[in-house]
Image: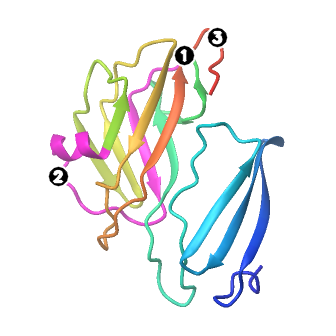
């Protein structure tokens, strides 16, 4: 693979994506040049988005800032991964985990919060504050989700790393306490 991603090589490389041993979809990275990288997919849901493709210099420090995990704390303070379907727990706070430390933000800066994480449809109560520790941001007071509802959470490039790099935007879709499975 090292040879494949050399700055002088072009071509494509296929990947198959599994989750918990079950096939999800396939995609290929298509490299025309170091600045022209695209993808093709097979078997993917129509809403699948592969974005933010680019080059990384392995000899320098990290030049990207990415979301590597999203979960919520339930009423018992357990970490529950935000998945397609989240059942039978109360969402009290969202936690976003990154590959690097996020920039400092005042804990009660509601404008920053509203621009950084957008929930659709909007929840009946808003965030009351945030906490930043190491490579995590905790959005406190994320309550007011309706049962049997499909939600979209947009994590925006308003969130920046400690070194000032904007986050590659992400969208997370899930259903909250569904009585029937969500179909995405």
Q: Disc 2 designates what residue?
A: 106
Task: Tell me the element at label 3.
Answer: loop
For residue 51, above or below residue 7: above
| Mark 1 nearby-residue class (10 Å; few <14, some 14–19, many ≥20) | some
Residue 115 place in picture, x, y as percent: 25, 44
In front of the other: 91 or 68: 68
State the image quarter where residue 5 is shown. bottom right
In front of the other: 36 or 74: 36
In front of the other: 113 or 118: 118
Q: How is the image coloured?
A: rainbow
Q: Earlier in the sequence, mark 2 or mark 1?
A: 2
Separation (CA) of disc 1 from disc 3: 9 Å
Q: Disc 3 designates what residue?
A: 180
Q: Nearer the viewer, mark 2 or mark 1?
A: 1
For residue 144, above or below residue 59: above
Q: Are marks 2 and 1 in contact (CB under 8 Å)?
A: no
Q: Nearer the viewer, mark 2 or mark 3?
A: 3
Residue 8 place in picture, x, y as percent: 67, 91
Magenta span? 88-116
Residue at coordinates 38% horizontally, 34% vertically from top-left?
A: 93
Residue 96 place in picture, x, y as percent: 43, 48
| Mark 3 nearby-residue class (10 Å; few <14, some 14–19, many ≥20) | few
Q: Disc 1 designates what residue?
A: 177
Task: Tell me the element at label 1.
Answer: loop
């Amino acid at each position: 693979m090292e040879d494949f991603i050399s700055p002088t090589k072009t071509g494509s490389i296929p990947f198959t994506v599994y989750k918990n041993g079950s096939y999800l979809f396939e995609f290929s990275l298509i490299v025309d040049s170091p600045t022209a990288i695209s993808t093709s997919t097979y078997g993917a849901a129509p809403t699948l988005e592969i974005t933010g493709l680019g080059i990384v210099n392995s000899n320098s420090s990290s030049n990207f800032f990415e979301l590597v995990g999203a979960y919520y704390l339930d009423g018992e303070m357990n970490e529950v991964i935000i998945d397609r379907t989240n059942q039978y727990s109360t969402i009290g706070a969202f936690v976003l985990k990154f590959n690097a430390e996020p920039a400092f933000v005042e804990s009660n800066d509601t404008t920053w919060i509203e621009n950084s994480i957008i929930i659709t449809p909007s929840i009946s109560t808003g965030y009351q504050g945030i906490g930043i520790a190491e490579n995590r941001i905790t959005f406190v007071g994320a309550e007011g989700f309706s049962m049997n509802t499909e939600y979209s959470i947009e994590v925006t490039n308003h969130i920046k790393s400690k070194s000032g790099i904007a986050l590659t935007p992400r969208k997370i879709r899930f259903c909250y306490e569904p009585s029937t499975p969500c179909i995405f």
